């Protein structure tokens, strides 16, 4: 590690989506097999393949040049496919060890088959749980229609207000 060089943090994950249904696999999902020059196995492209590419690229650079022009750190986790529940705490607890000038996310897609791509941003994810309470019993629309809000209409209006017609988020402070 050199104080004179910038530091790159490479993030990836080794966990995979469940292999079910197993009967749709031509070969066992956790036994890699090469067919037509391609590796088939659960997680080969999400995300083990990308991580392997980084490792082999670093090895090739060192083999041909002798040293890297940057410091490299890897953060590889095993909970990405289930929401990375412990990642935030790990990042907080290891802030100094993980400090870097740039982070590379080793978990994105290609533009097309055989076309390399550099993805410079991802949308991310946000989650919320809403509880909407309505009448505790059926109410006849001929008597109550219009005077008591229908919970389905209320939640539809709420969801519809989150983005505009072009897909831009309308939540104050979002951007």
Image (cartoon, rainbow, N blue to C red):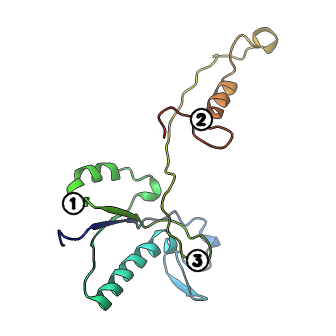
Q: Residue shown at 44%/52% (left/top)?
A: 83
- Callout 1: helix, strand or loop? helix
Asked whether residue 168 appears in the rendered view, the answer is yes
Disc 2: which residue: 162
In this view, the residue in front, 19 or 97, is 97
Give the x, y percent position of residue 104. Answer: 39, 65
Left or right, 134 with reference to 68: right
Q: Quadrant of the N terminus?
A: bottom left
Left or right, 25 with reference to 117: right
Are the residues flagged by discs 1 and 2 in contact, CB closer than 8 Å? no
Chain-order first, disc 3 or disc 2: 3
Disc 1: which residue: 97
- Callout 2: helix, strand or loop? loop
In this view, the residue in front, 71 or 75, is 71
Q: Residue shown at 40%/53% (left/top)?
A: 84
Q: CA distance from mark 3 to mark 1?
A: 34 Å
Q: CA distance from mark 3 to mark 2?
A: 35 Å
Outermost residue, bottom side = 64
Q: Residue shown at 33%/85% (left/top)?
A: 61
* Residue neighbourhood size for the residue with mark 2, other residues' Cα within 10 Å, grouped as few (<14), some (14–19), many (≥20): few
* Residue neighbourhood size for the residue with mark 1, other residues' Cα within 10 Å, grouped as few (<14), some (14–19), many (≥20): few
Chain-order first, disc 3 or disc 1: 1
Left or right, 107 with reference to 3: right
**Considering only vertical position in the picture, is 28 above or below 122?**
below
Chain-order first, disc 1 or disc 2: 1
Disc 3: which residue: 115
Disc 3 versus disc 1: nearer the observer: 3
């Amino acid at each position: 590690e050199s104080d004179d060089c910038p530091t790159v943090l490479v993030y990836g994950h080794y966990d995979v989506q469940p292999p079910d249904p197993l009967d749709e696999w031509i070969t066992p999902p956790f036994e890699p097999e090469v067919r037509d020059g391609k590796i088939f196995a659960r997680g080969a492209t999400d995300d083990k393949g990308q991580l392997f590419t980084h490792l082999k690229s670093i090895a090739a650079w060192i083999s041909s040049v002798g040293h890297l022009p940057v410091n490299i750190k890897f953060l590889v986790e095993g909970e990405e496919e289930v929401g990375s529940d412990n990642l935030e705490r790990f990042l907080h607890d290891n802030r100094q060890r993980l400090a870097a000038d740039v982070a590379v996310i080793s978990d994105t897609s290609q533009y097309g088959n055989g076309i390399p791509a550099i993805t410079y941003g991802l949308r991310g994810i946000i989650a919320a749980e809403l509880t909407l309470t309505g009448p505790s019993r059926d109410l006849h629309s001929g008597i109550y229609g219009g005077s008591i809000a229908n919970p389905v209409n209320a939640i539809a209006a709420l969801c519809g207000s989150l983005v505009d017609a072009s897909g831009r988020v309308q939540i104050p402070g979002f951007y």
